[in-house]
């Protein structure tokens, strides 16, 4: 991607972020007069500047959808860009847990002068469970246990903690560490190679094993334009660790440092049965 094209895309995304207020949007609080049986749905997404594959040094523009739902009167829990989709099965004032699922379209292939011959589907569907705990009102901790169903069929554990700051009622800013632990199957599906070629030089078979796959941090911000429209942005920094960082697909042509930028918005509306 050329610098001019990237600059044009980022300018367009910033324009969307700054000017997304809709003339038809209502500033009336959503849900005040709704019956308990009503559902509040939140739909939206991020435009994302991200590596073309996990471990790449090249970037491209992608899209990350956002979906949330709750019944009128239920607590609205804070969510983060890379949280798995979740459904509460148990909750208290400072804790919740339940089912979780995730769908990604992360490429595991790259061409040109390296052929990794992974032959795996790019659609990854995961299912599992999550738990979230607030030791104090301004700190969120979360753990996700996700088992691959299609594509990458390995096991991943996602860990996060965030400090939450609300400088003004309409603003929410957060910052905190991230880590992902995976089993051998997960690491191998992404980073093992049968054979790699570069400038007619052969590289030997490489088998990646599990452990700490990535560690890093995430900064997020969101601004409520109205009770229904919220603009959002985030910055992720992750460092590939261990066997993932040493894989030919990273060491020969990629980068162990991964940065992701996202900017977008969501819209809330009510559905009554």
Image (cartoon, rainbow, N blue to C red):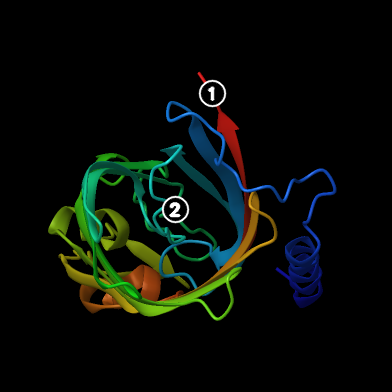
User: In the current view of this chain or complex, which residue is farthest to the top?
Assistant: 273
Residue 119, percent from left and from top: 36, 44
Q: In the depicted view, which residue is nearer to us: 248 or 222?
A: 222
Q: Looking at the rendered structure, which numbered label has been put on residue 106?
A: 2
* Residue 167 can be seen in this image: yes
Which numbered mark, 1 or 2, is in the foreground of this view?
1
Q: Marks 1/2: CA distance? A: 36 Å
Mark 1 lies on residue: 272
At numbered mark 1, what does the secondary structure look like: helix, strand or loop? loop
- Residue 216: quadrant of the picture: bottom left
- Residue 239: quadrant of the picture: bottom left
Residue 5, percent from left and from top: 79, 68
Residue ID at (59%, 77%): 168
- Residue 47: quadrant of the picture: bottom right
Mark 1 vs 2, N-terminal side = 2
Q: Quadrant of the N terminus?
A: bottom right
User: Few, some or many C-alpha atoms within 10 Å of disc 1 (few <14, some 14-19, many ≥20)?
Assistant: few
Position of residue 21 relative to residue 102, above or below, is below
Q: Is residue 267 left or right of residue 39?
A: right
Q: In the depicted view, which residue is nearer to us: 5 or 136?
A: 136
Q: In the depicted view, which residue is nearer to us: 110 or 163?
A: 163
User: In the current view of this chain or complex, which residue is farthest to the right?
Assistant: 23
Residue 235, percent from left and from top: 52, 74
Residue ID at (57%, 35%): 33
At numbered mark 2, what does the secondary structure look like: helix, strand or loop? loop
């Amino acid at each position: 991607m050329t610098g001019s094209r990237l600059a044009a895309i980022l300018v367009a995304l910033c324009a969307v972020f700054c000017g997304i207020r809709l003339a038809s949007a209502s500033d009336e609080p959503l849900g005040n007069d709704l019956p308990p049986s009503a559902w509040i749905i939140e739909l939206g997404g991020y435009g994302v500047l991200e590596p073309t594959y996990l471990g790449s040094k090249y970037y491209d523009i992608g899209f990350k959808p956002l979906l949330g739902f709750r019944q009128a009167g239920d607590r609205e829990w804070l969510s983060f860009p890379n949280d798995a989709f979740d459904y509460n099965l148990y909750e208290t004032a400072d804790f919740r847990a339940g089912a979780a699922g995730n769908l990604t379209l992360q490429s595991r292939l790259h061409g040109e002068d390296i052929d990794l011959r992974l032959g795996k589907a790019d659609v990854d569907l995961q299912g599992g469970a999550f738990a979230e705990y607030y030791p104090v009102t301004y700190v969120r901790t979360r753990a996700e246990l996700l088992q691959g169903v299609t594509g990458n069929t390995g096991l991943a554990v996602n860990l996060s903690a965030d400090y939450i700051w609300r400088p003004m009622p309409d603003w929410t800013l957060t910052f905190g560490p991230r880590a992902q632990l995976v089993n051998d199957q997960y690491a191998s599906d992404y980073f093992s190679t049968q054979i790699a070629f570069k400038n007619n030089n052969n590289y030997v078979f490489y088998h990646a094993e599990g452990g700490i796959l990535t560690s890093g941090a995430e900064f997020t911000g969101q601004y409520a334009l109205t009770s229904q429209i919220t603009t959002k942005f985030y910055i992720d920094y992750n460092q590939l660790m261990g066997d993932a960082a040493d894989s030919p697909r990273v060491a020969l042509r990629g980068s162990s440092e991964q940065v992701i930028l996202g900017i977008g918005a969501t819209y809330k509306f009510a559905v009554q049965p």
